[in-house]
Amino acid sequence: MADQKYIIRQQDKNTAVNFIDDQIASKSYWLTADDTQRLSAEREYRDAKHDSITLNKWCQKWLNETQWVQLINVICIERNRIESQKHRSPLKVISITHTAWQILSELAKHDDMTISEVIINRLGSSRLDPYNGTELSKLSNYSNNSNQS
């Protein structure tokens, strides 16, 4: 249908397939208004969606310019999402006592930062410089006061 100006790469195939699957499932006339052609396109798509080479051929045959633009946009958004995740520190979930959470929360409020930043700034630097006595005593005093309530 449309002149193919884009090649769906193997790493983009799942994104493309998910998008096309969603379009076909939610908009019965997304491919074409003609029922016979639509059924033929869907039948061919079921066979073509398993590898990027046949998927590209199918897209070239059945997608119009607007549909190609939609597909390319979805692929670009997914690529950007994946790329941004590569540069972000992965999150970990930990369990701490309520008292520990209170201490970290108060320190975070006081220092105007997140709990993660408190841990990194206060404990992460301990690998380089050990705590001085005042820092440790502040935490001990807070812990003792919290336990008395």
Image: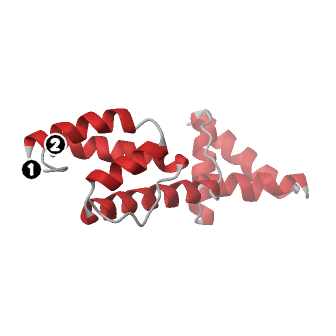
118 to the left or right of 50: right
Residue at horizontal 15 percent and vertical 43 percent from the top: 37
| Residue 9 tag number | none
Query: Which amino acid type is shown beneath numbered disc 2?
Result: Arg
Question: In x, y percent, where is residue 113?
Answer: 59, 62
Place residue 43 in its image quadrant.
Answer: top left
Question: In x, y percent, where is residue 75?
Answer: 43, 56
Tag 1 and tag 2, C-beta contact below 8 Å:
yes
> Quick one: which residue is furthest to the left in this view?
34
Number of marks: 2
Q: Earlier in the sequence, mark 1 or mark 2?
A: 1
Where disc 2 sits, the SS reads helix
Give the residue pinned by disc 2: 38
Q: Nearer the viewer, residue 115 or 85?
A: 85
Instruction: Give the spatial CA distance, label 1 vs label 2.
Output: 7 Å
Q: Nearer the viewer, residue 132 or 3?
A: 3
Q: Nearer the viewer, residue 11 or 42?
A: 42
Place residue 109 in its image quadrant.
Answer: bottom right
Residue at horizontal 88 percent and vertical 57 percent from the top: 132
Where disc 1 sits, the SS reads loop
Image quadrant occupied by the N terminus: bottom left
Q: Residues within 10 Å of mark 1 (few under 14, many from 20)?
A: few
| Residue 33 tag number | 1
Residue at horizontal 48 percent and vertical 39 percent from the top: 51
Query: Which amino acid type is shown beneath numbered disc 1?
Result: Ala
Question: In x, y percent, where is residue 149?
Answer: 55, 37
Question: In x, y percent, where is residue 142?
Answer: 67, 47
Residue at horizontal 80 percent and vertical 50 percent from the top: 136
Place residue 63 in its image quadrant.
Answer: bottom left
